[in-house]
Image (cartoon, rainbow, N blue to C red):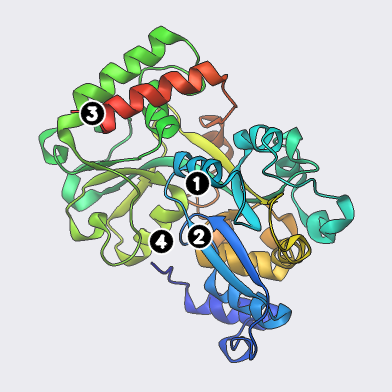
């Protein structure tokens, strides 16, 4: 899948950062390979190509579809096989304890000085372990022309009207799926209360016959939201923005019960083969002009404050990408749950999604 960038943004950031296509031909000779474990469509191809040209290295991305799949991939290799890891804030402590993340010396990534202090301090355990990357929200993307009305509640998905039945896509992640039901019921998405989790499981189980599938929402022309096979989906704001550019009937909303506010990090893998190259990539991607190009291409908000100041108002004033204070106040940040609570959710999720 590819993300389409508005032509004026391509020109703006190409001129500002030297990332114009004519200047980013592939390296003439094969160099070291930097392996990044990440989401698909989560690094700008132009930025990757520019780094390869400047460093002489090759970048290979290995994709995961859910946080659970990422954890499983790392467990299977005991953290080996990757140089950089895309990690959410709640996983940092566990990853460090398992020896999957290398400590990050302050001098290793000088361009960290451009980060927004609020994101740099969001998860204290990240200070010497990872670099904030992108942030955003989880909400509902839907086709207004197919639904026929505005959606404003998680219950619109969990107790769907006939036009939505069989045309729902729900996220395939144990935490985020339960977060939807918990928020709909008025509970914290971070609750460890067994009765509340059971109530959420019951609600999700009753919804299951109306769900087309559990998974990630594609953002290319084959996306089910664009073809009309799906009328509404749980997804993330940047993906919704990419789909909106393809069809102006795509709407993204943070339900009135509140949404989720997430922050992703890039961390150097402790078992990686090229730690110095990984640090060089982190420094490169935090050059303000590069971080701005990356954020513009991906339609996500950057954690780099200097980069944010380079973005045009069309992006920074887009409430889908940069929600206002009132919307953010309705969003809840992720916290790390006790192992027993995580296990309970995973078990309930497996029974719901993979059970008969």
Residue with the mark numbered 3: 355
Residue at the limit of the structure toward the left, as seen here: 162
Instruction: Name the one closer to the observer, 99 or 67.
Output: 99
Instruction: Name the one closer to the observer, 313 or 120.
Output: 120
Q: Is residue 204 left or right of residue 135?
A: left
Q: Please indicate, yes or no, whether residue 350 appears anywhere in the rendered image.
A: yes
Q: Quadrant of the N terminus?
A: bottom left
Q: Is residue 198 left or right of residue 227?
A: right
- In the image, residue 180 sits, relative to residue 138, either above or below, namely above
Q: CA distance from mark 1 to mark 2?
A: 10 Å
Mark number, residue 73 = 1
Instruction: Name the one closer to the observer, 153 or 33.
Output: 33
Quarter of the image for residue 171 reads top left
- In the image, residue 169 sits, relative to residue 195, either above or below, namely below
Residue with the mark numbered 2: 62
Element at badge 3?
A: loop
Instruction: Name the one closer to the observer, 166 or 205.
Output: 205
Q: CA distance from mark 4 to mark 1?
A: 28 Å
């Amino acid at each position: 899948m590819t993300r389409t960038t508005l032509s004026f943004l391509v020109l703006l950031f190409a001129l500002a950062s030297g990332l114009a296509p004519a200047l980013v031909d592939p390296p003439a000779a094969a160099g070291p390979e930097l392996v990044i474990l990440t989401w698909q469509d989560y690094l700008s191809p132009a930025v990757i190509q520019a780094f390869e040209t400047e460093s002489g290295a090759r970048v290979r991305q290995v994709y995961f579809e859910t946080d659970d799949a990422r954890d499983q991939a790392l467990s299977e290799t005991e953290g080996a096989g990757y140089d950089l890891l895309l990690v959410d804030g709640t996983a940092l402590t566990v990853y460090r304890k398992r020896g999957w993340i290398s400590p990050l010396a302050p001098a290793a990534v000088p361009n960290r000085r451009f980060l927004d202090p609020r994101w740099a301090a969001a998860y204290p355990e990240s200070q010497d372990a990872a670099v904030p990357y992108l942030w955003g929200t989880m909400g509902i993307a839907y086709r207004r022309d197919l639904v026929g009305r505005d959606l404003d509640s998680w219950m619109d998905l969990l107790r769907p009207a006939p036009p939505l039945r069989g045309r729902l896509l729900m996220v395939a992640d144990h935490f985020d799926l339960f977060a939807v039901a918990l928020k709909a019921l008025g509970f914290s998405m971070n609750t460890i209360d067994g009765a509340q989790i059971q109530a959420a499981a019951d609600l999700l189980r009753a919804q299951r016959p109306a769900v087309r599938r559990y998974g990630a929402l594609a953002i290319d022309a084959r996306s089910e939201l664009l073809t009309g096979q799906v009328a509404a989906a749980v997804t993330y704001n940047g993906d919704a923005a990419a789909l909106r550019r393809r069809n102006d009937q795509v709407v993204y909303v943070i339900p009135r019960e509140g949404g989720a506010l997430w922050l992703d990090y890039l961390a150097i893998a402790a078992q990686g083969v090229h730690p110095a190259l990984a640090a060089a990539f982190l420094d490169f991607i935090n050059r303000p002009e590069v971080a701005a190009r990356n954020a513009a291409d991906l339609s996500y908000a950057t954690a780099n404050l200097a980069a944010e100041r380079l973005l045009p108002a069309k992006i920074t004033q887009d409430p889908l990408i940069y929600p206002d204070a009132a919307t953010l106040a309705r969003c809840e940040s992720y916290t790390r749950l006790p192992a027993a609570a995580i296990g309970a959710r995973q078990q309930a999720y497996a029974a719901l999604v993979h059970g008969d």
